Image (cartoon, rainbow, N blue to C red):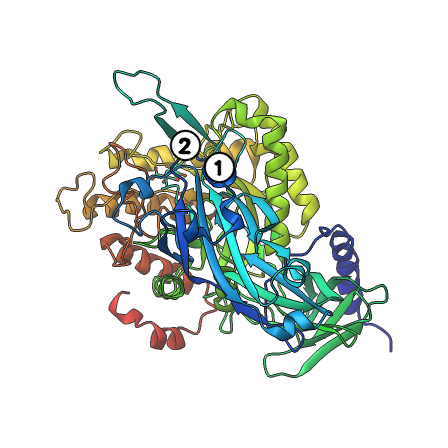
C-alpha cells in the first residue's frame, strides 16, 4: 500500500526521533509496577530509628550497627516511612539533626521468591535525603548520593545466601551538604569557646526551604524474572492524524530477547504492535495528549505493553504529544501553550517532605480548582507518583533538578559539575517517558554571573540535550540580563523577580515599570521566549490592611495584580508563562526574615486559600477560556465558574 504524504512526513519526523532514542542511558530505572511476571511488596510503614549523636557521627559505622538488630545497639524510636524524621518527635535535636541517622525494618520475603532461582528480587528506595547506605541482613547492597531520586539493589543473591525469607533492611542516611553536593552547603565549626561549646557546628545553605531529611518516598521490594525488561524509552510525534511512537527496549539477563510491543487505546483496543527491541508504532486517528484546559479530552494515555518472550511483561502509559519552542512561543502539539501555573514544594505539616497520597490528591484538586495548567518542580525532582498524576490529569511540568543555591564559586568546579551531570542523567532516565514533563530545568538561581558559570551551564545544558533532544532545557535565573552567563545556552529564559518585595519593599506602584524593563531587556538581548518563573509576596493568613501593607493578604493581591497587568501585555508578544511563588506556604530554616516558614503561598501550609488564591483562580480560568477550545459548559459543571467570572 502506497504511503500518503502525511505518512511520509511522519516517517521523516520519526527518523529524527529514533536517532535521539539511540542515545538512551545505559541502566534503567523503570517504576516498579505489578504485571503477570512482576510482584511488588511495599515495605514502607513503621520502621525503627536511631540518630547517631556521637560527636563525629561515626559510632554507627565503628560499631557496625548494621550487623545486628538496631535495638541491640542502643535506644531506638518509632519512625514512619515515608516521612522526614525532623518534625516527628518533640525533640529539637532530632528536628535540627545533622549527620547519620539509622533506619531498620524486618520484613518477610515470600518463600516462592527465594525458591524460584529464576526470580530477581530488588530493593528500591523512592528517595532518601541525602546520602544513603543500604544493608540487607548485615550485608551492604548499595549506596547512593543525592536526595529526590530513586536507587535500588538486586538483593536476590544476598537473600539466598543469608537467612532466607527473613530480611532485615538497614538504611543509614546522612543529610550533610557540602560544596559538591546538590544542593550545596557547608559545615561551619564554631571555634569561639566563649560563645559555643567544643565541637559546635552548623550547616549553612543558600536555599530557602527546610533541609528535611530521612526516607522520603516508599521503600519497595519487587520482583522481575532474571531475563527482564531493564529500560524502555519512548518518544512521540505526529503528522495530521497519524501518531508515531518510537521505542527502544533494553533487556538484561537474556542473550536472545524476543521483544513484542503492543499499544492499546483507552477502550482496550489494540491500535499498533511491533516485534523487536527498537521500532516505531504508527497510530491512525491518534488521540493526542493535551494539557488540562487546552482540549475537551485532555491527558489521553495509551497503554504500551512490552513483552520479552515468555518471561517478562511491563506496561507503560504513553501520551503522544510534541513540544517545540520558537523565538516567541512554546508549542504543544504545534499549538501555543501558555503556562498559567504554580511553583510547588514537597512540604507539609509533620511529614515534611515525606510522600503522602492525601496531600498529592488534594494538591491536584486545588490546582485544577484554580485553573492551573502547569507546575514547576521547584527545587528538586518530585515523587514519580506525582508525575504519574500529572500525566493522568494533563498538568504540564517543568522538571527541575536539585541544583539550587549554587552560590559559592567553589561549587562550580569539576567535581561539582561531574556530579551535576550524573544527577541530570538520573533525572532524565527516571522521567523521560512522562508526557507531562515538557522541559528540564538544570538549576535555580545559581550565581550565573560568576565567570565559571558560562562553561558550567554550557556543559550542563548540552549534556542534558544529548540525553533527551525532545525537550527544551532551561535554568531559572534571578541574575541581571547583562551579567547572566548561562542564558546563551538555554531554550527558554526563566526569570524570577520580586519587585516591591526584596527590591523597593512596599512600592507596588513600581512593579509595572520594573517588570516591563525586565522583559524588554531579556527579550532584546536573547530573542527567546520568557517565563516569569517566580513572583509573589508573603501574606500571613488573616492579616489585613487597606491601603495594603507588606505581609497582609491585600498586599499579596496587589503585587499579583500589578504583575498580571504586565503579563497581559507581554503575553501577546514573547512571555509564555507565569508561575506564582508559591502554591502553598512552606517550612524554611529559622531566620529573621521568615515567620515559621515562607508565607508566599496562595494557600496556607494546610491548603486553605488566601485572598490571592481567588484572584489567581479567576485569572487562570479567564486565560483558559480565551483559548476558545474549552467546552465551557462541561467545565462549569465540574468547577462552578459562574461564582467567580
Ligand atoms: C527565590 C527562590 C525561592 C525562594 C523565594 C523567596 O527566588 O527561588 O526558593 O523561596 O525566592 O520567597 O524568597
Q: Which of 288 and 211 is in front in this view?
A: 211
Q: Where is residue 367 in the image (x, y as percent from the top left)?
A: 38, 61
Q: Residue 200 carries which label?
A: none
Q: Is residue 476 above or below residue 376?
A: above
Say what secondary structure mark 1 lies in.
loop
Say what secondary structure mark 2 lies in.
strand
Q: Where is residue 524 in the image (x, y as percent from the top left)?
A: 52, 33
**Are the residues flagged by discs 2 and 1 in contact, CB closer than 8 Å?**
yes
Q: In this view, does 460 lie above or below 300?
A: above
- Exactly how many numbered labels are in the figure? 2
Residue occupying image coordinates x 51% and y 65%? 107
Residue occupying image coordinates x 32% and y 38%? 589
Residue occupying image coordinates x 15% and y 47%? 543
Image quadrant where one finds the N terminus: bottom right
The answer to which of marks 2 and 1 sits earlier in the sequence is: 1
Q: Which of 372 and 383 is in front in this view?
A: 383
The image quarter containing residue 242 is: bottom right
Give left or right: position of 503 versus 169. Answer: left
Viewer can see residue 345: no
**Residue tagged by mark 1?**
183
**Residue tagged by mark 2?**
205
Residue occupying image coordinates x 59% and y 25%? 413
Amino acid at each position: 500500500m502506497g504511503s500518503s504524504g502525511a505518512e511520509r512526513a511522519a516517517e521523516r519526523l520519526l527518523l529524527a526521533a529514533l536517532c535521539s532514542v539511540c542515545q538512551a542511558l545505559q541502566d534503567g530505572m523503570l517504576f516498579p509496577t505489578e504485571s503477570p511476571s512482576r510482584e511488588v511488596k511495599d515495605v514502607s510503614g513503621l520502621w525503627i530509628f536511631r540518630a547517631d549523636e556521637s560527636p563525629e557521627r561515626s559510632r554507627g559505622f565503628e560499631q557496625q550497627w548494621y550487623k545486628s538488630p538496631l535495638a541491640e545497639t542502643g535506644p531506638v524510636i518509632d519512625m514512619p516511612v515515608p516521612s522526614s524524621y525532623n518534625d516527628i518527635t518533640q525533640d529539637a535535636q532530632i528536628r535540627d539533626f545533622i549527620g547519620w541517622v539509622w533506619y531498620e525494618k524486618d520484613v518477610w520475603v515470600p518463600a516462592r521468591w527465594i525458591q524460584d532461582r529464576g526470580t530477581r528480587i530488588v530493593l528500591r528506595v523512592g528517595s532518601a535525603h541525602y546520602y544513603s547506605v543500604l544493608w540487607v541482613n548485615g550485608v551492604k547492597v548499595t549506596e547512593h548520593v543525592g536526595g529526590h531520586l530513586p536507587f535500588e539493589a538486586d538483593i536476590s543473591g544476598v537473600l539466598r545466601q543469608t537467612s532466607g525469607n527473613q530480611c532485615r533492611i538497614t538504611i543509614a542516611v546522612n543529610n550533610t551538604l557540602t560544596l559538591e553536593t546538590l544542593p550545596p552547603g557547608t559545615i561551619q565549626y564554631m571555634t569561639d569557646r566563649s560563645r559555643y561549646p567544643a565541637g559546635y557546628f552548623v550547616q549553612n545553605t543558600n536555599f530557602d526551604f527546610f533541609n528535611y531529611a530521612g526516607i522520603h518516598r516508599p521503600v519497595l521490594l519487587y520482583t522481575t524474572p532474571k531475563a527482564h525488561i531493564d529500560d524502555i524509552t519512548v518518544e512521540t510525534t505526529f503528522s495530521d492524524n497519524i501518531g508515531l511512537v518510537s521505542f527502544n527496549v533494553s533487556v538484561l539477563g537474556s542473550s536472545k530477547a524476543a521483544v513484542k510491543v503492543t499499544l492499546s487505546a483507552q477502550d482496550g483496543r489494540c491500535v499498533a504492535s511491533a516485534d523487536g527491541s527498537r521500532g516505531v508504532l504508527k497510530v491512525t486517528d491518534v488521540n493526542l495528549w493535551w494539557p488540562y484546559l487546552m482540549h475537551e479530552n485532555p491527558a489521553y494515555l495509551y497503554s504500551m505493553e512490552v513483552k520479552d518472550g515468555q518471561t517478562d511483561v511491563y506496561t507503560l502509559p504513553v501520551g503522544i504529544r510534541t513540544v517545540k519552542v520558537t523565538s516567541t512561543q512554546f508549542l504543544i502539539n504545534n499549538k501555543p501553550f501558555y503556562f498559567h501555573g504554580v511553583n510547588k514544594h514537597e512540604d507539609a505539616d509533620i511529614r515534611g517532605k515525606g510522600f503522602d497520597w492525601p496531600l498529592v490528591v488534594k494538591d491536584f484538586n486545588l490546582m485544577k480548582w484554580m485553573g492551573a495548567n502547569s507546575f514547576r518542580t521547584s527545587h528538586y525532582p518530585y515523587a514519580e507518583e506525582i508525575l504519574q498524576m500529572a500525566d493522568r490529569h494533563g498538568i504540564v511540568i517543568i522538571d527541575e533538578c536539585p541544583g539550587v543555591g549554587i552560590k559559592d564559586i567553589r561549587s562550580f568546579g569539576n567535581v561539582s559539575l561531574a556530579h551535576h551531570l550524573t544527577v541530570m542523567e538520573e533525572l532524565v532516565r527516571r522521567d523521560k517517558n512522562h508526557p507531562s514533563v515538557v522541559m528540564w530545568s538544570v538549576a535555580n538561581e545559581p550565581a550565573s554571573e560568576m565567570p565559571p558559570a558560562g562553561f558550567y551551564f554550557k556543559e550542563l545544558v548540552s549534556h542534558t540535550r544529548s540525553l533527551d533532544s525532545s525537550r527544551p532545557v532551561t535554568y531559572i535565573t534571578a541574575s541581571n540580563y547583562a551579567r547572566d552567563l548561562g542564558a546563551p545556552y538555554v531554550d527558554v529564559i526563566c526569570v524570577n523577580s520580586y519587585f516591591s518585595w526584596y527590591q523597593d519593599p512596599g512600592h507596588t506602584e513600581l512593579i509595572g515599570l520594573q517588570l516591563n524593563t525586565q522583559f524588554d531587556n531579556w527579550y532584546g538581548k536573547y530573542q527567546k521566549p520568557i517565563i516569569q518563573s517566580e513572583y509573589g509576596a508573603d501574606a500571613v493568613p488573616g492579616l489585613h490592611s487597606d491601603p495594603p501593607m507588606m505581609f497582609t493578604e491585600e498586599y499579596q493581591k496587589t503585587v499579583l495584580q500589578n504583575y498580571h497587568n504586565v503579563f497581559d501585555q507581554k503575553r501577546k508578544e514573547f512571555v509564555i508563562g507565569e508561575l506564582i511563588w508559591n502554591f502553598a506556604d512552606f517550612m524554611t530554616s529559622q531566620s529573621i526574615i521568615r515567620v515559621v516558614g515562607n508565607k508566599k503561598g496562595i494557600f496556607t501550609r494546610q491548603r486553605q486559600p488566601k485572598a490571592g488564591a481567588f484572584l489567581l483562580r479567576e485569572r487562570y480560568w479567564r486565560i483558559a477560556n480565551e483559548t476558545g477550545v474549552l467546552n465551557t459548559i462541561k467545565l462549569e459543571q465540574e468547577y462552578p465558574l459562574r461564582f467567580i467570572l
